[in-house]
Amino acid sequence: MSAIPTPLAVEAVPIAASRGYWATVFARVRRDKLTVICALILLALVILAIFAPWFSPQDPLATSMLKRLAPVGSPGNLLGTDELGRDLLSRLIWGGRLSLFIGILPVVNAFLIGTLLGVTAGFAGGKVNTAIMRTMDVFFAFPSVLLAIAISGVLGAGLFNSIVSLTIVFVPPITRVAESVTTQVRNLDYVEAARASGADALTIVRVHVLGNVLGPVFIYATSLMSVCMILASGLSFLGLGTKPPSPEWGLMLNTLRTAIYTNPLVAALPGAMIFITSICFNLMSDGLRQAMDIKQ
Amino acid sequence: MSALLEVLQLRKHFPIRGGLLNRQTATVRAVDDISFTVEAGETLGVVGESGCGKSTTARLAMHLITPDEGTIVFDGRTVGSSQMPLRDLRRQMQMVFQDSFASLNPRLTIEESIAFGPQVHGTPKAEARERARDLLAKVGLNPAQFIRRYPHELSGGQRQRVNIARALALRPRLVILDESVSALDKSVQAQVLNLLADLKEEFGLTYLFISHDLHVVQYMSDRVMVMYLGRIAEVGPVRALYENPLHPYTRGLLSAMPSLDPDKRTSAAPLIGDPPNPINPPSGCRFRTRCPHAEAVCAEKEPVLAAVGTERLAACHMVVAGSGHSKAAEVAA
């Protein structure tokens, strides 16, 4: 009998202050093991990249003709060596710097620019919306890979130029998401109520629109990071991104591809790094989306 | 009593665009040339079927949408002129919406939502929050328990109380209640209606009470305005209008009220069919397609809102002697 809860227990309302939105999201993420694991892997990769000089066992640029294409597990070279005898583990650690940088920075840039454009278009509506969104449609006419290659080709090879070209590639999709979310929010009664209280457009955007738009756009942006990394690797692979001898995963994949028959495991390692990182970004953004999707 | 809100010849037509080059292909006559006044201290109920322009009228009065034509005079000052800029109007006139959830920002606490309005008008943050707490207590929610909560943690009735507090935070003189209790359970509805009546007395408010629920309007209103297809059909004091409706549409609406008296129950549909499309309203009287008394004159001439007695107005040929309608004399007599 004691197992049956009394009806009074249901009535009891907790008087304690309730958690804020982000605190709730954080608590929900913590319960999602897969997301936590992915976040930890990404954190580890970022730490490895930032502190590469301390973690890397050897100089990533030191070549050795004697040790060319050593297999995985060779003494002194835990993950083998590349076609110029450089230590692959060191190069993978150092390569994380460039690869993560070029995978994240364009998306961050595009997030800032795209949100600004999208919120402006969505909130202003009418002709402003038409002008911004039709311009974005022009970019949608090209496949993203082709667009990145074309812009990089025009600007020339190099780290800075590939960041610029990738930013341009990711602005349109982020703008479109920001615009559609803003348009939805703009038509809700609480924005109408804010207008009815005499607030000007800027205050309404700041207080009532941004808080409800940034979340979904942020999630979308994190899911783009994996695409961005792969595109950046692709650009390097084609010789349009970073230049040798800088260690970068895409570029390493390119130079090691000739070794695929002689030493397949070593050749596949940079690809595996790209794969792990991008899948972690994707799974994490999935988990975040679920955690932020709090229904009443 | 003096008029607090005067609406003169208000008109709003929404263009429907489509086809090649986004041309305007049709017009929805949402609100077509309506005039009415709300006296200070009264509650004016507005009833009508869905799509008759009730909510559009409310949003036009608040200037949330700009009227095509017409003037709104608040407390003797023309809205939108230098006498009464919009910002000023919005401090004096507030609105409570139907959807209690959609009208609260999910990312703001209850306290922040209520304090937002006063802060916009320059009240310091601490003072605005103090006011939010006072108002929460006034609408029957314990401030200590609710200020830090988010909308999704509240029930529908609680949220609507918060919305009322939010509307009152600017200390308005007129509050537009647009179907504000329609989405609530009957028992909660009664509580909120009583709360509204209490608040009206305490703050000396004037209400424009929009609802499709005739019982609720009867309970709340001093005067009632009946709208049909973007036009006013009839205006009058609540008792006279409910006991002796002048317009056949009002009669139809009232006979559609479910009655507690078994003798008055009817199984016949009091109004047949749907309201015509406001894109192409019928010529003459807009109600003639559903009116049991329609005659030739109804199709030719549009009835004007004519005074009947001292307090009532109706837009029907039958209430105007000599209008050409065969029943004009007997009803008017």
Image (spheres, coloured by chain):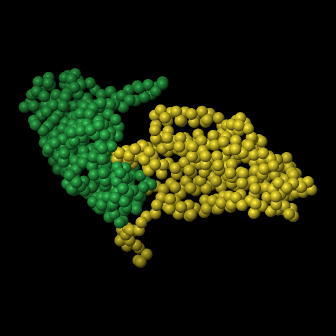
Chain colours: A yellow, B green
Please, which residue is most extreme toward the left here? B333
Q: Residue at x 77, y 41 (%)?
A: A238
Viewer-nearest residue: A213 or A48: A48
Above or below — where is A167 with respect to B191? Answer: above
Residue B102 is situated, as x and y percent measured from the top left of the image, at: 39, 49
Q: Residue at x 63, y 59 (%)?
A: A39
Residue A172 is situated, as x and y percent measured from the top left of the image, at: 59, 40
Q: Residue at x 44, y 54 (%)?
A: B107
Viewer-nearest residue: A293 or B168: B168
Q: Is residue B255 visible?
A: no
Please, which residue is most extreme toward the bottom here? A2
Q: Along the horizontal axis of the image, is A160 left or right of A190?
A: right
Above or below — where is A237 with respect to B199? Answer: above
Q: Along the horizontal axis of the image, is A274 left or right of A19?
A: right
Above or below — where is A25 with respect to B51? Answer: below
Q: How many labels sit on residues?
A: 0
Locate residue B80: give its quadrant. Answer: top left
Viewer-nearest residue: A190 or A276: A190
Q: Can you say which quadrant of the picture contains the C terminus of chain B?
A: top left
Q: Can you say which quadrant of the picture contains the N terminus of chain B?
A: top left
Residue A176 is situated, as x and y percent measured from the top left of the image, at: 55, 41
Please, which residue is most extreme toward the right here? A66
Q: Residue at x 32, y 41 (%)?
A: B86
Locate residue A55: give its quadrant. Answer: bottom right
Q: Is residue A267 visible?
A: yes
Viewer-nearest residue: B15 or A5: B15
Above or below — where is A14 with respect to A182? Answer: below
Residue B113 is situated, as x and y percent measured from the top left of the image, at: 38, 54
